Amino acid sequence: MNSNRVVAGTGFYGLNSNQLKKPAGIFVDVNLDLYVADYMNDRVQLFHPGESNGITVVGSRSLNPTIKLAWPSGIILDAEKYLFIVDFGNSRIIGSGLNGFRCLVGCYGVGSQSNQLNIPFSFSFDRSGNIFVADTDNHRIQKFLLMKESFALSFNQTKFCPTATWDSNGIIFADRSMAGEYPTAIFVSTNNTIYVANQQKNTIVMWEE
């Protein structure tokens, strides 16, 4: 890997289909389609391989505007091509289904209660389909349990039914003493090992199952 090239964006910020503005999250699927959480443009862009012009699939100027985004910061696509997005500015996690987008967790306003989030930045699924959220301004990692009847694994990629739901009340997986202040990045591996970026202590913390 001795060379690199730009696959999305022009180097100048903007709202055109070939531009981005402070992209914050990316996901590449098995077809090498690139999904970008275009943070400051309040949208998610899809770039097909070799294409410089993106398609707005969620948010500002999308073809089917079913939900408004505010600074999307993270994105995951499941095996059925359902999108899951960190809606950073609205402090919630949303997901797509048969009838458009819906709120999944953090649907009760900004706050620190078990059913609330406060400026979450990223999230990840474990191998049981539970959601782990870096609840940044609450200085914690929240775990939201999947309702068991709606999940399967497909080629090591998460696969949900379109009506999958999660418990609205999260469990504190790691508090400030473990996750540090303002945790921003989280990753859960296929063997359920959890990694969190602890900005306060300049470390990456790991939990093994």
Image (cartoon, grey):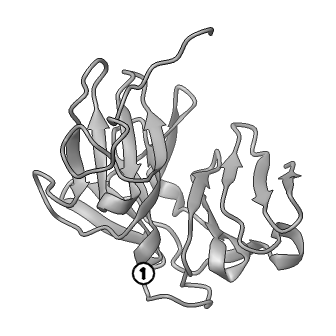
Q: Position of residue 85 (x, y in %)?
A: 42, 57
- Compared across the picture, whether 7 is left or right of 48 comes to right
Image quadrant for the N terminus? Answer: top right
Q: Position of residue 124 (x, y in %)?
A: 60, 52
Q: Position of residue 144 (x, y in %)?
A: 60, 68
> Which quadrant holds residue 130?
bottom right
Q: Which residue is mark 1?
A: 107
Residue at the spot 83% in from the left edge and 71% down from the top edge: 180
Residue at the spot 14% in from the left edge and 61% down from the top edge: 65
| Kind of residue sitting beneath label 1 | Cys
Q: Is residue 134 above or below residue 125?
A: below
Q: Position of residue 120 (x, y in %)?
A: 56, 70
102 or 146: nearer the viewer: 102
Image label count: 1
- Compared across the picture, whether 124 is left or right of 176 comes to left
Instruction: Check the image and name the residue furthest to the left.
Output: 63
Instruction: Check the image and name the residue furthest to the front.
Output: 12
> Which quadrant holds residue 66?
bottom left
29 or 50: nearer the viewer: 50
Q: Is residue 161 above or below residue 198?
A: above
Q: Is residue 78 above or below residue 123?
A: above
